[in-house]
């Protein structure tokens, strides 16, 4: 393979990185089972596959493999390795590999994707491209903010896309963007986390811009702050405060005084929005500070109180399996095992919690002390390296360096345009010499110009720290996870992380053979991702139509056995069996429903969601065939084992017991349900009815 292909590969790698940064936060789609997270995850999957293939081909073409020799890279590698080990011991390997069905982020596949993208950025970016990618991240966040802000005033562009009408009427009351916007990210707190991460970068862009060209950077900052405030996110406000404090502390008082008007204008804007349009945020803050007994019974339990209960369950899960946890993304299953009874007294007692609503407790419960420790080590290493870069930048008078090992050949000279300055690098082995572009404009004073790399590093420290504050009260999503990893990789690439080179001694034929293997693997991986996407689209169609054919197609397209699809398919089969007028057809459908149910249970025996769907299948089957009532009873007993503090499980068990004439056992189950939740009207009514008493 000739060197002529390397520039083409570089361009394709660069285009892939740019595309992932632009599309991931902005994309949403109605084609699949979920609007926001799933489409974004598939973009990340495809980007990772392309970057893996293109970078591998580049290694083959140049005859050498480059591996980052950086503590951040190795700590991320260790983190992913522990995710793999935890998956092997997971209580539900399917969920650990693929992620929770409506999230995907956090599953092993997503961790592989982030690792590939992080590594590809470290290996392929030079200073110029790293800086452009950072600016693209800011631009993407600006677009997300501009998309979301009109929703606060009742003109949500999402509704225009979904219904063709520019209003906010396409959302249910609890998702009303006039109260809390969410733009293209799907939830107000997620949007707030995203804004918090990018605002320091936007501030850094403003600081390094010339005085005559600061209007656009300030408009970007204003839009990001507005979007954050319109989310009415308390955690977002806390994260912003931490990010701004850290950024202010790291840039120093001299730079703050020099740009005092900018900081003052941003503070005034924030204050005006809080006073003029922050009623929802102020009410949420008051609710969070209110004592539990002061909250009205019909107003819903404050989210902070529910979060504390969920944290208790996460802590109990961690104590039970402290080393490797229950497996990546299995919190929804482990939480039911340790769910505090106090959760039954909340307004969200029957909600599913697939996350611990604390990123760190989530890792602790899912991957144990090893997983959490590896994550903290990665963050610590990242902050340490970013801090070193932020301190080392000032030695060259503010002019950014080209990364080591990326200067070019002995006869080449490369220029790196950077906000009016250019860097000329020669092959003498010494550091690149700085010169300033002079096209009729005043030359920048190198003693006063802030080092772009150092400023960006300080912004990254502040942004990631602020983001971690937000996920302390929530969890990561696809867009924030991608941008966190990329932001760290970009700053490291600006500093030129050392790369270990492994020479490949291959002849032309061997190179072609290796390239063919890589391309074949790339095709297989691409088809794998496309099958995942197609299956998701078919599953969404099947759910909306409640038809057998799309479900069967979704099952066949999915690359592997999907217990969620199988359990849903079994239920639809049972419904068709119940409605069939032909006894022979009904019998065939019944047998198929039972068979698909057993497949689902064998794949995920500890998955309470699959178990409940299979229970619905047998409940439907038992309407026409009492023989299935015994199996239904077994399933309901298993449900109470997997969720011993959930009153609905005991109610389901009581119904199954009554169906078999086990009235005494049913009374005991109903008593347990009422003990767990005294205001459980359905259980109490059935208890009174069974006892032969009238409802008081």
Image (tube, grey):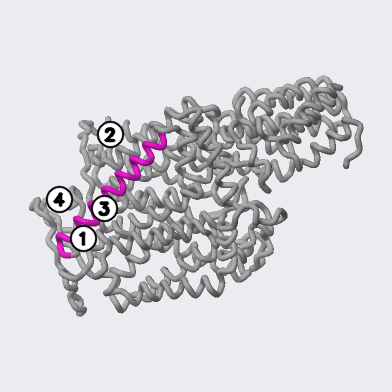
Q: Is residue 54 highlighted in magenta?
A: no
Instruction: Name the quadrant of the C terminus.
Output: top right
Which mark is in front, 2 or 3?
Answer: 3
In the image, is 533 to the left or to the right of 595? left
Looking at the image, is mark 4 or mark 3 earlier in the sequence? 3
Q: CA distance from mark 3 to mark 1?
A: 16 Å
Q: Which residues are magenta?
A: 371-397
Q: CA distance from mark 4 to mark 2?
A: 23 Å
Q: CA distance from mark 2 to mark 1?
A: 37 Å
Which mark is in front, 3 or 1?
Answer: 3
Looking at the image, is mark 4 or mark 2 earlier in the sequence? 4
Q: Which residue is mark 1?
A: 400
Looking at the image, is mark 2 or mark 1 earlier in the sequence? 1
Q: Which residue is mark 4?
A: 409
Give coordinates of residue 567: x percent, y percent: 68, 31
Which mark is in front, 4 or 3?
Answer: 3
Q: Which residue is painted at 20% across and 76% down in the image?
A: 439
Q: Main secondary structure of the magenta part?
A: helix
Q: CA distance from mark 2 to mark 3?
A: 41 Å
Q: CA distance from mark 4 to mark 3?
A: 31 Å
Q: Considering depth in this image, is 21 or 503 the residue closer to the camera? A: 21
Q: Which mark is residue 387?
A: 3
Q: Secondary structure at mark 1?
A: loop
Q: Is 160 located above or below residue 691 in the figure?
A: below
Looking at the image, is mark 3 or mark 1 earlier in the sequence? 3
Q: Which residue is mark 2?
A: 511
């Amino acid at each position: 393979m000739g060197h002529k292909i390397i520039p083409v590969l570089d361009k394709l790698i660069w285009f892939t990185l740019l595309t992932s940064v632009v599309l991931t936060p902005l994309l949403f789609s109605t084609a699949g089972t979920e609007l926001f997270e799933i489409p974004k995850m598939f973009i990340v999957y495809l980007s990772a596959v392309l970057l893996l293939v293109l970078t591998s081909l580049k290694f083959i073409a140049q005859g050498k493999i480059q591996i980052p020799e950086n503590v951040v890279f190795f700590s991320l590698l260790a983190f992913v390795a522990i995710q793999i080990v935890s998956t092997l011991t997971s209580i539900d390997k399917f969920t650990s590999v693929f992620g929770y069905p409506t999230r995907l982020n956090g599953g092993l596949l997503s961790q592989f994707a982030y690792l590939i993208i992080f590594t590809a950025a470290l290996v392929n970016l030079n200073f110029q491209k790293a800086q452009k990618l950072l600016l693209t991240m800011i631009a993407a966040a600006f677009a997300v903010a501009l998309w979301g802000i009109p929703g606060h005033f009742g003109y949500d562009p999402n509704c225009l896309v979904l219904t063709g009408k520019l209003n906010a009427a396409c959302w249910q009351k609890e998702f009303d963007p006039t109260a809390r916007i969410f733009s293209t990210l799907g939830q107000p707190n997620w949007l707030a986390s995203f804004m918090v991460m990018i605002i320091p970068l936007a501030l850094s862009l403003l600081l390094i811009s010339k005085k005559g060209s600061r209007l656009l950077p300030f408009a970007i900052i204003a839009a990001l702050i507005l979007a954050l405030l319109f989310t009415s996110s308390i955690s977002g406000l806390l994260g912003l405060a931490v990010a701004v404090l850290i950024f202010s502390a790291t840039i120093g008082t001299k730079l703050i005084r020099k740009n005092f008007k900018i900081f003052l204008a941003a503070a005034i804007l924030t204050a005006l929005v809080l006073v003029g349009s922050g009623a929802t945020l102020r009410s949420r803050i008051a609710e969070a500070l209110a004592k539990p007994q002061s909250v009205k019974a019909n107003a819903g339990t404050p989210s902070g109180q529910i979060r504390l209960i969920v944290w208790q369950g996460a802590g109990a899960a961690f104590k039970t399996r402290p080393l490797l946890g229950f497996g990546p993304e299995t919190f929804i299953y482990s939480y039911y095992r340790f769910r505090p009874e106090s959760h039954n007294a909340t307004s969200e007692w029957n909600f599913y919690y697939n996350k611990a609503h604390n990123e760190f407790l989530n890792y602790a419960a899912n991957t144990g002390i090893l997983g959490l420790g590896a994550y903290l080590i990665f963050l610590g290493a990242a902050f340490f390296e970013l801090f070193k870069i932020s301190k080392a930048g000032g030695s060259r008078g503010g002019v950014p360096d080209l990364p080591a090992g990326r200067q070019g050949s002995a006869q080449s000279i490369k220029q790196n345009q950077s906000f009016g300055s250019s860097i000329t690098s020669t092959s003498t082995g010494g550091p690149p010499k700085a010169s300033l572009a002079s096209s009729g404009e005043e030359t920048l004073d190198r003693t006063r110009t802030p080092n772009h790399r150092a400023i960006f590093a300080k912004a990254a420290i502040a942004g990631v720290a602020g983001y971690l504050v937000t996920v302390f009260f929530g969890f990561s999503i696809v867009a924030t996870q991608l941008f966190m990893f990329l932001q760290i990789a970009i700053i490291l690439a600006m500093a030129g992380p050392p790369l270990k080179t492994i020479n490949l001694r291959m002849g032309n034929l061997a190179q072609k053979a290796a390239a063919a293997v890589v391309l074949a693997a790339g095709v297989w991986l691409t088809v794998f991702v496309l099958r995942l996407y197609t299956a998701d689209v078919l599953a969404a169609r099947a759910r909306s139509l409640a038809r057998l054919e799309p479900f069967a197609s979704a099952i066949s397209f999915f690359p592997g056995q999907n217990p969620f699809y199988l359990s849903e398919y079994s239920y639809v089969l049972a419904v068709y069996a119940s409605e069939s007028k032909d006894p022979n057809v009904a019998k065939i459908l019944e047998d198929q429903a039972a068979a698909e149910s057993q497949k689902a249970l064998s794949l995920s025996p500890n998955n309470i969601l699959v178990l409940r769907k299979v229970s619905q299948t047998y409940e439907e089957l038992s309407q026409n065939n009492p023989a299935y009532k015994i199996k239904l009873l077994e399933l309901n007993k298993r449900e109470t084992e997997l969720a011993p503090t959930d009153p609905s499980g005991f109610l389901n068990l009581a119904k199954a017991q009554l169906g078999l004439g086990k009235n005494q056992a049913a009374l005991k189950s109903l008593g347990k349900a009422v003990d767990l939740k005294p205001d459980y009207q359905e259980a109490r009514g059935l208890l009174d009815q069974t006892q032969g008493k009238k409802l008081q």
